[in-house]
Image: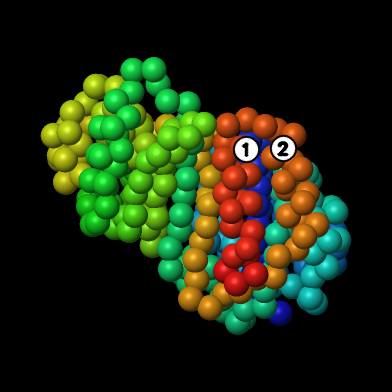
């Protein structure tokens, strides 16, 4: 049978989502847990597919992973063998060919950081809207051979609470796109570049690309689908909330706020 897992994790101690030889990864930990609980016989048969691969240090509260398993999972048992910084929040049966990356309607990433002392917040709040719509994001991504750099941002915003919070929603994102958009906005807000430079960059015509902002501010907040539904696992939810409270850094506190706000929507996601 094919199942989708709703996954939350703190990526601080991992080399990204994708399994790598000799390095701790989210996928590696998940597949080991699935094997330990008898849900998969080997990694290949699991046919693990993820809605959005996250890089080293990036976290998630709404990652969706599809796996082929031998029987219905005992989510409490699965959470018991997963480390404290990874939790299954729910699961759902899906068709045998379900691929969450292809089936996703949108992905929502949130980035949080301490605001620089010289930041013009009102300028950043206004300029973030420039990213909405279709653009050539070649100046805002790590380019991959043969892959187009054109993409569309459905929603972009910035607000201030305990930290500076950026939200981006799109059908898909390019490699390092969110972190590079954040860096561009921080450079704008600090006067390193001007609005005209940003406009040129969004047309793919800036003289240089933007480097990525640090990974420790980014998390995948939500992935939306047309019909996919999850039942919230209360123990998995409580486990991850406990981890975030213990960690208690800026990103963890923002993840906790988002997770608590999303709790009522987990049942029908």
**Percent from the top left, x then y, of residue 41?**
80, 67
Q: Nearer the viewer, residue 152 or 211?
A: 152
On the image, numbered disc 1 is attached to which residue? 252
Figure check: 266 above or below 241 = below
Quarter-of-image position of residue 178 = top left
Give the SS element for disc 1: helix
Q: Can residue 18 be seen in the rendering of this structure?
A: no
For mark 2, does the 10 Å Cα neighbourhood hold few (<14), some (14 to 19), or many (20 or more) residues?
few
Q: Quadrant of the C terminus?
A: bottom right
* Residues at circles 2 and 1 in contact by the CB criterion of under 8 Å: yes
Give the residue at mark 2. 245
Q: Vertical placement of 146 versus 213: above or below?
A: below
Q: From this view, report whether residue 266 is shown above or below residue 236.
A: below
- Most extreme residue toward the bottom is 95
Examine the rendered structure and indicate whether residue 172 appears above or below residue 167: below
Left or right: residue 65 compared with residue 213? right
- 141 vs 263, left or right, is left
């Amino acid at each position: 049978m094919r199942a989708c897992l709703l996954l939350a994790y703190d990526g601080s101690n991992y080399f990204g989502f994708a399994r790598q030889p000799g390095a701790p990864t989210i996928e590696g930990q998940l597949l080991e847990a699935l094997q330990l609980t008898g849900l998969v016989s080997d990694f290949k048969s699991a046919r693990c597919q993820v809605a959005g691969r996250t890089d080293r240090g990036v976290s998630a509260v709404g990652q969706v992973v599809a796996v082929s398993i031998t029987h219905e999972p005992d989510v409490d048992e699965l959470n018991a063998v997963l480390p404290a910084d990874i939790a299954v929040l729910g699961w759902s049966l899906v068709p045998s060919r379900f691929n969450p990356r292809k089936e996703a309607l949108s992905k929502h990433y949130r980035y949080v950081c301490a605001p620089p002392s010289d930041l013009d917040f009102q300028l950043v709040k206004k300029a973030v809207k420039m990213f909405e719509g279709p653009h050539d994001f070649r100046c805002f991504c790590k380019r991959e051979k043969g892959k187009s750099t054109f993409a569309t941002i459905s929603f972009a915003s910035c607000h201030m609470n305990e930290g500076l919070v950026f939200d981006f929603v799109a059908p898909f994102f390019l490699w390092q796109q969110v972190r590079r958009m954040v860096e561009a906005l921080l450079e704008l807000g600090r006067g390193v570049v001007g609005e005209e430079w940003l406009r040129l960059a969004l047309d793919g015509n800036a003289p240089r690309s933007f480097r990525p902002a640090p990974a420790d501010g980014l998390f995948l907040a939500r992935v939306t689908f047309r019909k996919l539904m999850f039942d919230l696992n209360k123990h998995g939810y409580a486990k991850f909330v406990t981890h975030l409270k213990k960690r208690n850094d800026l990103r963890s506190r923002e993840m906790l706020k988002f997770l608590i706000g999303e709790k009522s929507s987990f049942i029908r996601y």
